[in-house]
Amino acid sequence: MKRIILILTTTMFLLISSCKNEIKIPMAATIAAAKEYQGKEISSEFDVKINALIAQMTIEEKIGLLHGNSMFAIGGVERLGIPELKMVDGPLGIREEISKNSWASAGLDNDYATYYPAAGAVAATWDPELSYTFGNSVGQEARARGKDMLLSPAINIVRTPLGGRTYEYFTEDPFLNKKLAVPFIVGVQKNDIMACVKHFAVNNQETNRGTVDVLVDERTLREIYLPAYKAAVTEANAYSLMGAYNKFRGDYLCENDLMLNKILRDQWGFKGVVVSDWAAVHTTVKSLENGLDIEMGTPKPFNEYFLADKLIQAAKTGEISEEEINKHVKRILNVLFQVKAIEGKDRTEGSIATEAHYKDAYTIAAEAIVLLKNDKNVLPLKLEGINSIAVIGNNATKKNALGGFGAGVKTKREVTPLEGLKNRLPEGIKINYAEGYLERYAKNDNNQKAEVTLHGPVPVNELDADKLVEAIEAAKNSDVVIVFAGSNRDYETEASDRNNLELPFGQDELIEKILDVNPNTIVVMIAGAPFDIAREKEKATALVWSWFNGSEGGNALADVLLGNINPSGKLPWTMPRQLSDSPAHATHSFPGDAIAEYKEGLLVGYRWFDAKKIEPLYPFGFGLSYTDFKFSDLKTNKETYSKNETIEVTFNIKNTGKLDGKEVAQLYISDPESTVQKAIQELKGFKKVFVKSGTTEKVILLLPVKELAYYNEAKKEWVVEPGIYNLKIGNSSRSIASEVSVTIK
Ligand code: BGC
């Protein structure tokens, strides 16, 4: 693995003697450009052994490798020393063990794991090194559990703010997406675990996910929806990818020749395996020939899978050649060798739910929290003179490691916001807790279970009268109020998209009534996707965004509220004022019906808001700090570049406030002279930088000119247009501090 070492020098002080006093003048130190992550290539060193194994295998043994023999494993061949390939979900950490033949829990008492912050939180750190930390940490946990493949990361683009899996995905931006995906995968695979990058591809909605046919033009596909997958293959060398449920241009993604054979293998050189999403396979011969390697599924006899008995039959009748089958078996054996599952004498053993891993979860959580509003610097909380704090809201105590339809984590540690505050507040301060709103859902006809519709569970939005009185009393009788609002993992869930952006369970009304009795109210959102928080933005004194933030989420949150951590998270997607401002909704192309045509094309996320001049509630890349930063001296190392060069962009960030803090410098480029449609600006570089109060750091960002390319459909290649490009530096997509131009020859 090649890794360029990051040179990080601390702020240096130049001591200058004046006549009488010694004056300390802080001088800019240099923060070098970001580390590049590169995964170990899938080598061909085992080819001879693989061919020898294949020569000894029966057709049944071969096909045993091509489909699940239980919920999360494929068959091995014991007599030849080929083990089962064991898989595990997923994005929040290592999933609890489930039964071999059903989704029921296996009922073990040794399958606890660290609950890591959800991908949205990782993206909000804007820190590829933390993504690597996550991958490495969770990779160790996968090994400790004896697994070979981790079904993660999930890197679909956040196309609609309503997406049920938004919390599981990183971002709306392809550049941020790939810069986070690559280190994550490298971190996972360092531990002799295959990362399974999902869900390939254009799986951007849960509604009709099993049937919908996505239509997206070629340029948008290449520029928005595929870059992170491509980087996962060509830079991170991911060992596996998961084919998505939906169709793309008429073919299911697990039998999509264009995506699996042409793009993934022929164009990107992928050598790993393609695993189907669970029960996403529809054909036998077509799936295999079009690039699928392994079929996984949900309960039914495993021999009834498309790549099981039916495939044996097809092989016997000559409908498919043994050579074709061998090709897939070879790929699977190869990745088993790569992670030392075969002949793995020095395979890493890993560790799980250790203090070191909880610390990783804490660090990510702390860096992910986004400060959205902070009137009169009410945060961090100044405790002098404060005797009591009202902690209000079901989310103060709600746990999110498990919940909803998707994979979660069984964990021994999930510090809730209330527990975090109790852990961190000095003893003299009284906490007046009130649940405020109840997490309630409409019941089904026999009034038993929550009714689950196309839009997931239906929330009951009436407040409970007693709970409301209790909350108002707590607010009245406390010096400060913190409302923990938002959603949870039952409400934001796989398999459905939300119906609207409203806060569920009557929270708007609750918050309004609390603000009436105590204007000194801070609102903390715990959620994984955008919500309509316009009222909260207007009326609360401070607004903080936290996430499904892992085992240590409550401690991290308390540390931010109390100022032990200076917040540095930035939104990884645009928060719209209203749904109709968002591109997929403005173009009425969500959720579609049999077909979902992505009519907004390239203008996904902030690209749309910029082009249509729509003011978002909070823009992409936004997040405040308890200190202030000033950008200056933006320059490039040259004025003119040729296409193979790299632009060295330097600038200074000064911390002009009283607290040390981290700022995310964001580099956006625009191409005013373009002959084709381009977004007004596109993220093409970023760096999170620690700057001590009163000092200045000089930052270098490296921008390869090839990053300026657009995908030329006619030529079928990436083209950098010559001309002038503007490079803009700022701390959100809507807060640009300065701009410089370069010419590309
Ligand atoms: C999800 C995948 C997951 C798989 C196995 C599917 O429903 O889409 O992300 O890895 O189930 O749990």
Image: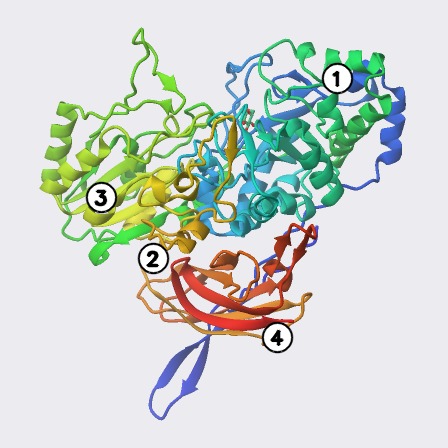
Between label 4 and label 3, give the one nearer the viewer.
4
Residue 98 falls left or right of residue 79? left
Question: Nearer the N terminus, badge 2 or badge 3?
Answer: 3
**Dot 1 amino acid type:** Gly
Q: Which mark is residue 64?
A: 1
Q: Kindly check if marks 4 and 1 are in contact, taking CB atoms under 8 A apart as contact.
A: no
The residues bearing labels 4 and 3 have C-alpha atoms spaced at a distance of: 48 Å
**Secondary element at image label 3:** helix
Q: Which residue is depicted at the point 82% across and 17% down?
A: 319
| Horizontal and vertical percent position of residue 295 | 67, 22
| Horizontal and vertical percent position of residue 324 | 82, 26
**Dot 2 amino acid type:** Ser
Instruction: Assess disc 4: are there few (<14), some (14-19) or many (≥20) residues with their C-alpha within 10 Å of its C-alpha.
Output: some
Give the labeled residue for mark 2: 625
Question: Nearer the N terminus, badge 1 or badge 3?
Answer: 1
Q: Kindly check if marks 2 and 4 are in contact, taking CB atoms under 8 A apart as contact.
A: no
Q: Is mark 1 within 8 Å of ligand 1?
A: no
Q: Quadrant of ligand 1?
A: top right
The residues bearing labels 2 and 1 have C-alpha atoms spaced at a distance of: 55 Å
Give the labeled residue for mark 3: 535
